Structure formats: structure tokens, C-alpha cells
Amino acid sequence: MAGIYIHIPFCKQRCRYCSFFSSTHSAEKGKYVETLCRELELRQGYLANAAIDTIYIGGGTPSTLSERHFREIFKSINTFFSVATDAEITLEANPDDISAEYATMLRSLPFNRLSMGVQSFDNELLKRLGRRHDAERAISAFHNARNAGFDNISMDLMFALPGSTTESWTGDLRKMLELHPEHISAYNLTYEEGTPLFHAAQEGTITPLSEEENLEQFTSLVDTLTAAGYHHYEISNFALPGRESRHNSSYWHDIPYLGCGAAAHSYNGNSRQWNVADISLYIKGINDGEPDYEIENLTETERYNDAILTRLRTYDGLPLEWFRNKFSEKYNRYMLKTAEEHISRGTLMHGDNDTLRLTRKGIFISDAIIRDLIFID
């Protein structure tokens, strides 16, 4: 079992908070897709012929691609890889792109899951974030996707937005639940260095929410969605029963994946590899037969730290028997000693099936707990 991630870096406009690799220059879009297909051919052996269980096309804004582009990509994937008949196949989309016609076109392709970046239903907050849709367009996009036959839709929200209030956040949650998507991702806004939002905060033209306000919105998020029947299966992710994201879950459960496209990352269990974050250099490298990438062979310490970073984010937690079999005694001793301190504080629990999990209290300070458990040589 393995996954494929395809990175489409093109955006019609850049959001003010975004630090992901992307470009608003789309002149090379066709050449880029051709190069993606070439990379899929060149790297067909990376996953050792494992069946492909998930495919995720992300970005950037993949919904800027045409039907022809998608068909070229799927033709290459199906030519060079063995895709499971029940594979989860997701497209990340901007609500502004999901017209009724576009949604119908997407459903005629292998896509069976749509992930839309809504972020808020407050138009003033959307403008502040630099989003190109408004609340009405987001709602319309959801209905267009549903009417086209998508029965697995994920929608993103962001909390702790500058200028947001208890009332605006409550309104966002209420409107989201009225739509009742199968999956909701909710992310704490971060001010990434180099982004326009970061500079605005530095200059004082916007004011980030306080830690108390941040915590209040997160608490409301968890209480509201769990009361509505959503499973809080990862710190930032909620799903109706059986609708957890299989692709994202593979990242948290040590499942190999191939990443194709500029800046895309790959993982095969022993090493991580990432392509150059430059569209022109990426295209040149692949087409010259000399791909431009870096690779990191993972030490036991790095694999240990990866396990801590990913497993403790999930409701499933860290299975101790798996951990004992995977890592040497040194790492087991260190982890258990540090974990005991948090168990005694009530931020970690040694739960059913010999598993360590964050408590409700621990979720609020998960970064600090994970930082404590990280092993530094």
C-alpha cells in the first residue's frame, strides 16, 4: 500500500498567509503537466511496485487545470502504477473554480473526493486573507460538487483569524454544519515569515488574536464538531464515521508515498526526497534526464522523531508494541521517561491497547509535548 502526491504550484492569486511553494505565472502550465507525466514514468520504481491506495492532487491551486491536463496525468499514473480499484483520489480546489460545469467534468474523471479551501464564511475576513472567493461562492461550490455526484467532500476552515470574534467563529461553524460535509479540516492561522500577513502583523496593521482567544476558538471548534457527530481523529481534522482522509492518514502512519512536481516530497521508509522548489529548474532537470532534487537518508534518531511528530497528532496515538519493535532500547527508555512526566500532568494518557494518546488537555499544548519527546543527539 502506498500513495502518490502530485503538486500543482499554479495560483490565480497568492493568499496573504500562504508559505507553500506556488506561482501566479501560469504560462508554463502545459509544459509543467508534460514534465509531471515524464517524472511519473522516470520514478515508477520508487514505491517498489506497491499498490497505489491514495492519490492526492494538491497545490497551489490544482483546480486551475483543464480536463485535458487531468486526463494526461491519470493516463500516466495508470500506465506506470497499479492503482487499487477502491483508491481514494482527491483534488484540492478553490471554491471560486467549482462551477456546475467544472464539478461535472471533475466527476467524469477518477476523482472521488474533493477538498475545498473555504477558510471562513465571513467576507471581510476572506478579504483580509486574500482569498478570491466569497461566502456565497463557497456555498455554491459545495452544492455544485454535491449535485455533480461527489459524496465525499472536505472543507477547510481557519481559526484565530485577525479581526475574528466569538460571534464570527460561531457563525463559521454553524454555516459549515448546515452544509454537513463528510470531512472538515480546521487550521490555526500561523504567521509564516515572509508572507504579507506576517509583515502586516510586524508593522501593526493587523493584530493577532491572543492565546486566550485562540484557545477559546479551538475549544468551541472541538466541542461543536464532536457534538455534531464528527470524529476528531487528528489535531486539525474531523470526519464523519468512515470518512477520515486516507491519504493524510498515510503520512501519519509511516506509509510510503511518491511526490511528483516542483517542491514535492517523497518518502520510502528509509529516506526522504524533495524536488527543487523552482518550476523552470524542475522542468529542465526532468527533461534533461537529470532531476534536480535532494535526498536525506534517515537515521534512527530522525525516524524516532518522525514517529513522535506524526503518531501523537492522531486519535490512534502511539502504539507502544509497535514502537518497541521499531526502535532500540535507548529511544524506548527516553520516550517512556518523558511520557511519564506528561501522564502525571494529565496531558498524555496510557490508554487502551497499550497506546499513548494526547488527552483533551494535551491537545491544547501538543507542540510543547512533542517538543519534549523529541530526541536530540
Image (tube, helix red, strand yellow):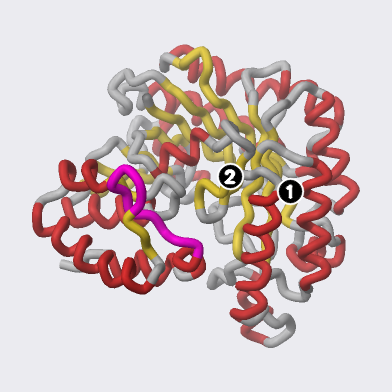
- In what element is the residue under mark 2? strand
- Asked if residue 32 is among those painted magenta in the image, a careful observer would answer no
* Other residues around mark 1 within 10 Å, as few (<14) / some (14–19) / many (≥20): few
Residue lying furthest left: 329
Q: Residue furthest front?
A: 352
Q: Amino acid at mark 2?
A: His
Instruction: Give the image location of residue 349, x and y in percent.
Output: 36, 59
Q: Earlier in the sequence, mark 2 or mark 1?
A: 1
Q: Position of residue 2 (x, y in %)?
A: 39, 28
Quarter of the figure with the N terminus: top left
Q: Residue at the location (84% across, 61% down)?
A: 122
Residue 279 in view here: yes
Classify 10 Å Cα crowding around label 2: few (below 14), some (14-19), many (20 and above): many
> At numbered mark 1, what does the secondary structure look like: helix, strand or loop?
loop
Number of marks present in the image shown: 2
Per the model, the C-alpha gap separating discs 2 and 1 is 34 Å
Which residue has dot 2 on it?
231
Q: Nearer the viewer, residue 348 or 260?
A: 348
Residue at which label 1 appears: 12
Discs 2/1, front? 2
Quadrant of the snapshot with the C terminus: bottom left
When the figure is inspected, residue 65 is found, relative to residue 330, above or below; the finding is: above
Q: What residue is rendered at 85% in x and 34% in y?
A: 143
